[in-house]
Image (cartoon, rainbow, N blue to C red):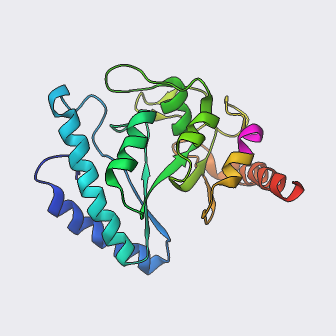
Amino acid sequence: MNPATAGNKQKYLELFERYVELCVDIGSPAIRVDSVAAPGSIPDNEYKPAFDRLANVWRDAASIAEKYGIRLVWEFEPGFAFNKPSEIVAMHDRVNHTNFNIMFDTSHAYMCGIVGARQHGHKETLGGGLREFLHLLKGRIGAIHLIDSDGTLHADETSTHRPFGEGFIDFKGLAPQLLSVPNIDWWCIDLCFWPGSWELVESSLEFVENLLNQKVAA
């Protein structure tokens, strides 16, 4: 259900609360949301009203999740609307709720902040790369997904989640900032849509453990 569409708020929140209850049942500390609407699906004259409606819905959703002790995190990505760096910051400001945070997926961040894939209107990219993106989102991040990016889209829709070392992300250089993000329960290795993902779990874990060891060494 599209939470940015007029008239969907109550049904969305009722369904959202059921999923929050599921989080409690399975012991998940957080629930992930996205804007549902595909890039290009919102007319220019409806873009700002849809943005405001979505912020309003997520503010109430954050309160519902907080009631259950569940953190709400928004996963921005090129497959869904409102994916420019400035829009991501603006959405967090507009929701303005302590229980609303951003999920930082390194592949999505690369495609949204460096490539500027599937953005509404003019393209917006960050000259400082993922380090600048992390700086922009300082104090706003509630979950982290790690995977590489080769700057392409999967099926022309969302970020290609390429195995570590096969893309352009400098994880070693990015690790100190990632490690400094407070209140993160765990890092998720995200091999979404990648064929043979199970065979890559062990090597991916080793890669991430080496990143975590940088903190120990420091």
Q: Position of residue 4 (x, y in %)?
A: 22, 46
- The reply to whether residue 32 is visible in this rendering is yes
Q: Position of residue 215 (x, y in %)?
A: 81, 55
Specify the farthest residue to the right: 217
Q: Quadrant of the C terminus?
A: bottom right
Q: Position of residue 35 (x, y in %)?
A: 32, 46
- The reply to whether residue 149 is visible in this rendering is no
Number of numbered tags placed on the structure image:
0
Q: Residue at x 56, y 26 (%)?
A: 151
Q: Residue at x 12, y 48 (%)?
A: 6
Q: Residue at x 60, y 64 (%)?
A: 183
Magenta stretch mostly in which secondary structure?
Answer: helix
Q: Is residue 151 above or below residue 77?
A: above
Specify the farthest residue to the top: 122
Q: Position of residue 116 (x, y in %)?
A: 46, 25
Magenta highlight on residue 87: no
Closer-to-camera residue (167/98): 98
Q: Is residue 118 above or below residue 69?
A: above
Corner quadrant of residue 121: top left
Q: Left or right of 32: which side holds 191?
A: right
Closer-to-camera residue (99/152): 99
Q: Left or right of 99: which side holds 206?
A: right
- Span colored in magenta: 171-175
Q: Left or right of 209: which side holds 180?
A: left
Q: Is residue 56 above or below residue 125?
A: below
Closer-to-camera residue (145/92): 92
Q: Residue at x 27, y 64 (%)?
A: 60
